[in-house]
Amino acid sequence: MTRIKQDYLIALYLGRRDFVDHVDSVDLVDGIVKVDPSGLNGRKVFIYLACAFRYGSDDLDVISLSFRRDIWLKRIQIYPPTNGNPTKTPMQESLLKKVGEQGCPFSFQMPTNLPCSVSCQPRPNDRGKACGVDFEVKAYLANDADNPDEVIDKKDTCRLMIRKIQYAPANKAGPKAELSKQFMMSDKPIHVQACLEKEVYYHGDPITVNVKINNETTKTVKKIKITVDQLANVVLYSSDTYTKEVCAEEFEYVFLCACSTYEKNFQVTPLLANNKEKRGIAVDGRLKDEDTNLASTTLSQGDKEMQGIIVSYKVKVTVAASGGG
């Protein structure tokens, strides 16, 4: 159970901080706000859940510019209650036993077209929040829900960062790609086929790449290189794609003579630990300073429009033959 600001007029309680995107639905964000009505002085208690894209740290704000844009926000009033006596979730029932009669339940249902929590790896000396997509639950005291002229004291607010994480579906057969390369002064090509044994790999899993080569030329194949690239598509006002190499291995003990065939399984393992110095790599959203990993692939349902940072990965196989190519 996570709680915050127990000694103030309001306190925010959540049973967990991670909520799963199942592609066709997202876990309900449910919790409790403990309210002490004695010090409200006619004010109301509101709470919102926001998905925001942060594209600059707070210490860059020197001319009152906001480096944050809300992708999605939902706000509700929880005290005085406006929706009667809604059905409580098992999590809320458990939290109410801890909080008592002053607990006010709330819940938010996120749409399926929101990105998952992602941040861009900063430089070692960078301070403040990293660029990326984050989710925040915030409760506050105010006279109006969203009045830009109303000043809200910091002690009258409480907030918690949560994470929206991606569910990995059941594994299917892995993708396959083929290429035939024709060389000058040679009437026959080199055929290369690469395939993965499965579609989904978990963080830290070695990726097995099956490589088949049919060398019909007079050249000799001496080296195979396998790389894994991360593609981060930043969709906000426009769409920009950033490609970062997160794993690369060369296998130089390959010797494939002319007019022969070759087949072998190679393994590569992309790890954040090997990319700590690379600024801008997308990583899964983190809470405080805990460890994380390379960002999970963003899965979407159909052609639903999505903003934020969309992550995917590409495995490339390069075959080097004598004489170039």
Image: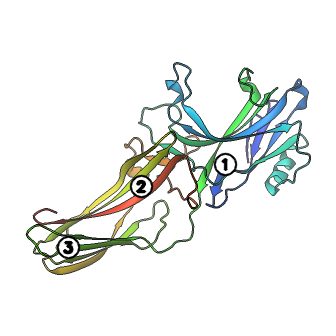
Farthest bottom residue?
260
**For this view, does 1 lie left or right of residue 302?**
right
Give the residue at mark 2: 271
State how far apart marks 1 and 3 are (Cα): 52 Å
Contact (Cβ within 8 Å) of mark 2 with mark 1: no
Q: Position of residue 308 (x, y in %)?
A: 54, 45
At horizontal 40% and vertical 57% (from top left) the residue drawn is 270
Give the SS element for disc 3: strand
Give the residue at mark 1: 17
* Amino acid type, mark 1: Arg
**For this view, does 265 lie left or right of residue 19?**
left
The answer to which of marks 2 and 1 sits earlier in the sequence is: 1
Of circles 3 and 2, which is in front? 3
The answer to which of marks 3 and 2 sits earlier in the sequence is: 3
Give the residue at mark 3: 190
**For this view, does 67 lie left or right of residue 258?**
right
State how far apart marks 2 and 1 are (Cα): 24 Å
- Mark 3 packing: few (<14 Cα in 10 Å), some, or many (20+)? many
Q: Position of residue 80 (x, y in %)?
A: 89, 36
Q: Position of residue 319 (x, y in %)?
A: 22, 66
Q: Position of residue 28 (x, y in %)?
A: 73, 53
* Amino acid type, mark 3: Ile
Observer-nearest of 93 and 30:
30
